[in-house]
Amino acid sequence: MTERQFVKTTIEDRVAIITIDHAPVNALNNAVLDELSATVDELNANATVKAAIITGGGQMAFVAGADVNEFTKLTSPEQAKEFAQKGQSTFNKIENSPKPYIAAINGVALGGGMELALACHMRIAGDRVRLGQPELNLGIIPGWGGTQRLTRIVGPAKAAELILTADNFTPQEAYRLNLVNKVVPGGEVLKTAKDLAKKIAGKGAMAIAGAMDAIGKARDAELTAGLAIEVENVVRLAGTEDAQEGITAFLSKRQPVFKDK
């Protein structure tokens, strides 16, 4: 992996752990976004990686949000548009990846940090973290996908409440809203995310990619179109060596050994 200043990556058992390390609160500025975007490109192209985790460095934050200092530099509509599109483009790469990304929310996740977590496919949260979209307190709105992804996950009425009040909310409320998959003690967040990622990484790479494709289309397409895409992936996978191995192993009552073929 390429060495970077603010985004660190390690790989364990075919799982990539991406740590955003921009002290003190891992705020996202142009440089961090550039490094995160390049890291995602690199991991998506790495055939040895089957799943990825994004977490925050230090003890305080997952990502506390966009770097507010960047906003002072947005002196024209063109600059504001470029900054919004950069964040959206980076997060779209995560959401549209053929590999699952898990947000290990180990500290505050506010504003752009919340939007980064929303772009991941699964979210594990510490039991004392704070979550929220506080942008309206600054006279702006979420601009890196928060208005769209939060609405798709929790529904328009609840998304309107969370965005328009700009109130923080607890991980327990996030769990009730299906916004996070699990809430665990703070010290267990990364371990829980790794256990989940490694369980997924034990499956065949082509089956993972096929499922991710179908799930992604279910999010964006009408039911009929989504069902057609599901069929396409079933047909594509049916004749693979991994499918034959998985079925044979099941019938033989043994663990499958996938070769990603």
Image (cartoon, rainbow, N blue to C red):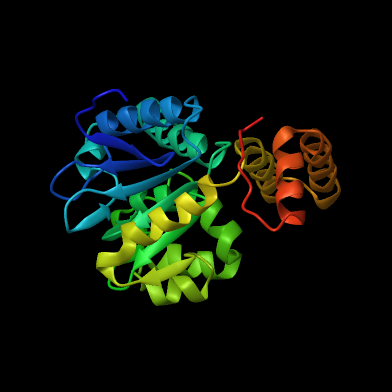
- Please determine whether, in this image, residue 29 is positioned above or below residue 149: above
Query: Who is closer to the viewer here, 202 or 189?
Result: 202
Query: Who is closer to the viewer here, 60 or 10?
Result: 10
- Please determine whether, in this image, residue 176 is positioned above or below residue 19: below
Name the residue: 47% across, 30% down.
Answer: 48
Where residue 11 sits, quadrant-wise, is: top left
Image side of residue 213 versus residue 109, left or right: right
Q: Quadrant of the C terminus?
A: top right
Name the residue: 30% across, 35% down.
Answer: 9
Image side of residue 87 versus residue 228, left or right: left
Q: Quadrant of the N terminus?
A: top left
Q: Where is residue 68 in the image (x, y as percent from the top left)?
A: 23, 44
Q: Position of residue 147 (x, y in %)?
A: 51, 53
Tally the numbered discs.
0
Q: Is residue 35 visible?
A: yes
Name the residue: 39% across, 53% down.
Answer: 194
